[in-house]
Amino acid sequence: MIVATRNEHKLRELREALPGIELEPLPGRVELPPEDGETFAANALGKARAAHAATGGTAIADDSGIEAAALGGRPGVRSARYAGEGASDERNLEKLIRELEGAEDRRLAYVCAIALVAPDGSESLFEGRCTGTLADRPRGDGGFGYDPAFVPDDTGPGDERTMAELRPGEKHAISHRGRAARALAAHLGSAA
């Protein structure tokens, strides 16, 4: 399967979350559409369709981000560009921490949509969520994006580790991308 992304972190996480499924990086000649959809699903489908149209093969794409309850769901689909076009993960995270400074409601949700376009053009969509809270400051060196300040609910009360402090297996077991990837794997297993 072709993975419609140029993000090495996402490709690595999908490979870790989908053991036994051969995932190929997007060929350099394939141009992806802009991520201008209003939903994660719309953006994922657009990328998977573009990769399928260019290669004729099975293509998957994910779009994911973080939603802050106190910000009405922002940054949402704009998570990768929250601090502006071309902003680094660190700048995006700094902006989110700054905007939630002093907020009583620090609840967050990571959201992931994975789109699959089969060789015959049929489409499937798989979604995953992971809820948590925003830490006061970044901690840990694993993961990417907002992981250093995302304290997941699923590790249990009293566990204040951020996603960036979890071991990869722990993270994949509860993450939004891991949950969407397992739904994709189950679908592929039932289709085989």
Image (cartoon, rainbow, N blue to C red):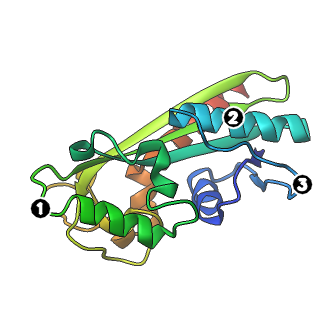
**Residue that carries the numbered disc 1 in the rendered image:** 102
Say if mark 1 contacts mark 2, CB within 8 Å: no
Can you tell which quarter of the image residue 116 is in?
Answer: top right
Return the mark for residue 46.
Answer: 2
Between the C-alphas of marks 2 and 3, the distance is 17 Å
- Residue 51 visible (yes or no): yes
Which residue does the image show at 48% across and 68% down from the upper left?
89
Between the C-alphas of marks 1 and 2, the distance is 38 Å
Which residue does the image show at 52% across and 67% down from the upper left?
87
Question: How many circles with numbers are drawn on the protein?
Answer: 3
**Mark 1 is on which residue type?**
Gly
Callout 2: SS: helix
Asked if 137 appears above or below 119 in the picture, the reply is below
Query: Who comes first in sequence, dot 3 or dot 1?
Result: 3
Pick the front one: 145 or 93: 93
Q: Position of residue 102 (x, y in %)?
A: 11, 61
Image side of residue 150 versus residue 192, left or right: left
Circle nearer the viewer, 1 or 2 = 1
- Residue 58 visible (yes or no): no
Task: Count residues near mark 3 (Cα–Cα under 10 Å), then give few for <14, some for 14-19, many for 20+.
Answer: few
Return the mark for residue 154.
Answer: none
Which residue does the image show at 30% across and 76% down from the upper left?
139
